[in-house]
Image: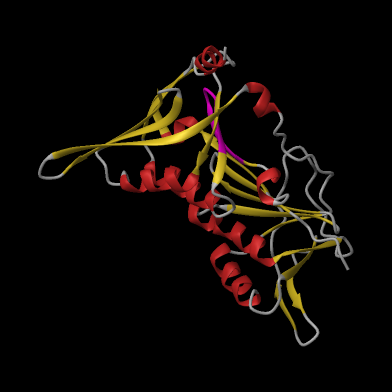
Amino acid sequence: NAEYGDRKRLNMRFRAQIQDVSLFHKVVLTVQKIYQQAIIHLTPKKVQFIITKDATDDFQVWAGMNAASVFSEYTIESLNNNEISFSVNLDNLSKALKSGQYAQEIRVKLSKKKGQPFLTIAIEKTASQTMHVVQEIPIQMLSAMQLSSFVEPSLREPDVFIMLPPLKYLKNVVDRMKNIDIYLTIQANMAGELTLKVDTDMVSVSTFYRNLEHPHIEGRSPPKKDKTKSASVKVDIKKFSRCLFSSNVSPTNVICCLVENMALVLHALLDDLFITYYVPVWTGN
């Protein structure tokens, strides 16, 4: 019975007060720059955003934070180890959160009407009088089996890992380069040097950065500054530029990991928040 199966799958509860609307909204806006539709995976301790390669031509985003960073009075119950996953349009979610940025109180919960699940956001604003606004965002629930089909990429150890310069300045440079070519070559070494280059038959433009740091990755010995250890990749410059919108969340560190001609991974980190981008690498001539 399809109706029974739908009811059984929605045998779950999620409700919370959003205590940091600004942070939640910034994360949604940042992930939305990659693609409008995302999976939100809720666990008793974590909130995770996933954009899969099926939707974005191999571009993937995996982002997450502690539930306690954005929610209070957090209740989550399900038959799947108290985990809940659903697909949601980030534009709809962003607009709802924006309208609640200066609210006295903003609450979120799962609801269902005529078999359609919704993420319901209730906003209470107090000015000369109290105003209640309720927004219902349609969502598509995912089963545990559906969620298990989405697996974060597993890559070999990077050839080079290096801190990026401040993202706002980097984005200004990259956006100017977008006018020259559609591809960007990113080259870095383990001596703190990073080069961004666009190259056409008519012109070649490079930007050089020096004295960048190499993060000490937990569980490994400190990196050696070996100038011969370098790596480069070529990527779609517009896709790389969209990653730099992670400046919205003011990350304390952004780590760029390169596997020669194979992979570019960016990790934007802020306290317990992380946003990881798996950027497709162009392997043509």
- Residue 1 appearing in the image: yes
- Residue 119 x, y percent position in the rendering: 42, 32
Q: Quadrant location of the C terminus?
A: bottom right
Q: Main secondary structure of the magenta part?
A: strand
Q: Quadrant location of the N terminus?
A: top right
Residue 57 appears left or right of 251: right
- Residue 194 appearing in the image: no
Magenta residues, as a range? Answer: 39-50
Q: Nearer the viewer, residue 16 or 150?
A: 150
Residue 80 appears left or right of 58: left
Tell me which residue sits at (74%, 76%) in the image.
198
Tag count in the figure? 0
Is residue 42 inside the magenta stretch?
Answer: yes
- Residue 114 x, y percent position in the rendering: 41, 23
**Outermost residue toward the left in this view:** 128
Tell me which residue sits at (59%, 16%) in the image.
80
Residue 203 appears left or right of 270: right
- Residue 159 x, y percent position in the rendering: 84, 53
- Residue 209 x, y percent position in the rendering: 69, 71
Residue 29, compared with residue 226, is above or below; it is above
Residue 130, compared with residue 2, is above or below; it is below
**Outermost residue toward the bottom in this view:** 202
Q: How is the image coloured?
A: secondary structure
Residue 136, compared with residue 45, is above or below; it is below
Is residue 200 inside the magenta stretch?
Answer: no
Q: Quadrant of residue 204?
A: bottom right
Q: Nearer the viewer, residue 33 or 212?
A: 33
